[in-house]
Amino acid sequence: MATRVLVTGAGGFIGHHLVRYLVAKGYWVRGVDIKYPEFESSLAHDFQLLDLRRFDNCLIATSGVDEVYHLAADMGGIGYITGNHASIARNDILINTHMLEASRINGVQRFLFSSSACVYPDYRQDDPDVTPLREEDAYPAAPEEGYGWEKLFTEKLCQYYAEDYGMETRVVRFHNVYGPLGTYEGGKEKAPAALCRKIALAEDGDEIEIWGDGEQTRSFMYVDDCVEGIYRLMRSDYRHPLNLGTDRLVTINELVDIIANIAGKRIVKRHDLTKPQGVRGRNSDNTRLRQVLGWEPETSLEKGLAITYQWIARQVAPARHGQRRLVAV
């Protein structure tokens, strides 16, 4: 009999890809979200629209499943998470605490929590030439306001549920995931998707807006590598937070140049220093990832961005030509 798993956030970007991955592995998958996937139908065997801020819905979601991949969260790009501290912290703490307790009550065997590199302190990320972040660098704690604090708190709650109740918990810290079938407009998109959209809509030689001076640095992980890493961590015996990202550091200006090259366009950068830009530098130290999983993300930035750009370019093509875009459901 197939192992029964729950993926929360299954209507979102990473969750949708994870459902597809787990179904291909032979699992019976229930997807739960407050919305259906936007760009294609879910492959989940059972998909339920449930608001997980309500404890009764968490009990429904976790009923009859062996494992939980908990990805549901109120989150978005830098503009969104810097402007909504109270609602993000309130919503996500409700979702996370209810999901852990419902999983305990319903006898879930393994529970994976999707945390974030936003748990790392600003004082370790104030230079574009940042030292890669090790898992222990999260303390002394000073995470990003709102989103970072609720992630760090839930990491500790997973630890307490493991210690007090014997629940097998896993914690993964994502570092800037990108790829197709994700949000690329509306304010919740991340930098790679936003830049792909801007460049896809631009003509050769056009100017696009860059938030900040463009010298802030990040590492970026393709979504297929992300779901592979999630699965490998869930199957492992490692019970502590683990980075999941690449360790190739690029500036946002360099990211623009890579995408522009993929698009075959000359792009002029206009920097807006009034817009949110986050920490100056963030990179993943993958030493422990390699030790624990014997693996690390493999997709090059150029390859992953080429796939992502081509998908986003197809989505925005009608808008570029003044037509109404239709989304298949």
Image: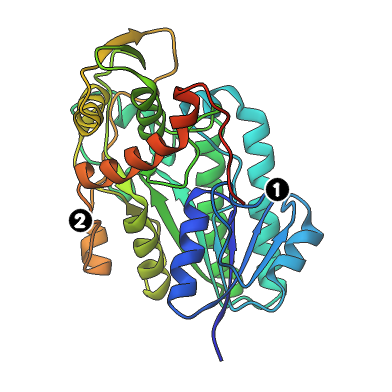
**Considering only order in the chain, which callout, 1 or 2, is on the residue closer to the N terminus?**
1
Residue assigned mark 2:
287
What is the three-letter code of the residue carrying label 2?
A: Thr
Q: Marks 2/1: CA distance? A: 33 Å
Answer with the quarter of the image where residue 124 lies.
top left
Please state which amino acid type lies under the numbered disc 1.
Answer: Leu
| Residue in view at x 19 percent, y 48 percent | 300
For this rendering, which residue is in front, 91 or 31?
31
Q: How is the image coloured?
A: rainbow
Q: What residue sits 47% from the left and 62% below the top? A: 18
Image height of 316 relative to 109, above or below: above
Q: Is residue 148 above or below residue 300?
A: above
Q: Are marks 2 and 1 in contact (CB under 8 Å)?
A: no
Task: Tell me the element at label 2.
Answer: helix
Query: Percent position (x, y) of residue 329?
Result: 62, 52
Is 45 left or right of 280, judged from the image as shown?
right
